[in-house]
Image: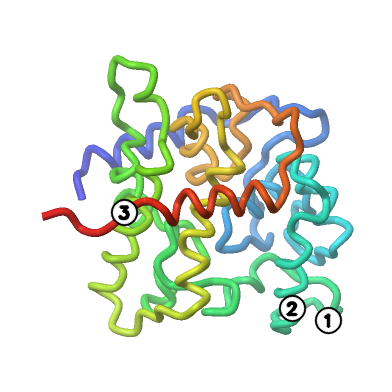
Amino acid sequence: MKLGLFVKIALYSLATTSYGWRPKGHEWHPPLPGDSRSPCPGLNVMANHGWLPRSGKNIDLATLRVAVTGAYNYAPTTFDKAFEQAIAFNLTTTGNSSTFNLADLAKHDDIEFDGSLSRNDFYFGDDLHFDPVIWATVAEKLGLYEHGDSEKDKYVTVETAAKARAARVRDAMKVNPTFNASLNEISGSPGTTALYLTTLWDTKADAAPKAWIRAFFEQERIPFLEGYELPEKQKTGADINAMFARVQSVNVSVQH
């Protein structure tokens, strides 16, 4: 991987050290030692902004409903099935069967799966924490550090995102001898791409701003500094499903 890309990521990560986020009471703070975080950037973002407990621990359904509405303006029940799935898998280590800690979601091939956009595979020893090497390969495919002269160069389209996801999966399959192309991975991989696109979508541009994606994945924060505002129209599972269909419709076969 090109050294220049690592340098750019480091510079963006160190550009600011504190933020005056709105709304009041939900400023961004990085996790403290002992806090629990998940393989999912979107959940970690909500904890870093205090929409979920900043500790990342003892999360119940009511708390999740408030968080997804406050942080991203999703309808409160949008992720009820995902919550129920986590509980059904008996992943919790809280001692309460109706709650979980964010790190509980790292159990391999239940919620977490091979070929993550920002985490390494379980086979390599850490499927929980952000991996800058893995992310650098994805960021390059997304063109996150390419700055052209036109307005469109500021955005990631569905086609670009879908192809970057597929390339990441192909890379993982090449180096991970235990890569598990389970039903969870087959649907979850394009599903996570559809989810982050829906969450960060700029409707007017019909694309996701590169700056928003960088902040979301690299610092796990809501990109208010980069111009993000809560969408006026509340999003639902139907919006995620529609984006999933768009991601799936992209021809991601390797071009020769």
Q: Are marks 1 and 2 in contact (CB under 8 Å)?
A: yes
Pick the front one: 23 or 147 = 147
Task: Tell me where residue 137 appears, x and y as whole percent.
Answer: 30, 51
| Residue type for callout 2 | Thr
Quadrant occupied by the C terminus = bottom left
Label 1 Cα crowd, 10 Å radius (few <14 / some 14-19 / many 20+): few
Per the image, the residue denoted by label 2 is 92
Residue 147 sits in quarter: top left
Q: Does residue 99 lie above or below 160 as drawn?
A: below
Label 2 Cα crowd, 10 Å radius (few <14 / some 14-19 / many 20+): many
Kindly state the secondary structure of the residue where label 2 is placed.
Answer: loop
Per the image, the residue denoted by label 3 is 251
Kindly state the secondary structure of the residue where label 1 is placed.
Answer: loop
Q: Are marks 1 and 3 in contact (CB under 8 Å)?
A: no
**Gap in angstroms between the C-alphas marked 2 and 3:** 38 Å
User: Which residue is found at the position 25% from the left and 59% from the top?
Assistant: 253
Q: Does residue 109 lie above or below 155 as drawn?
A: below
- Is 61 left or right of 171, judged from the image as shown? right
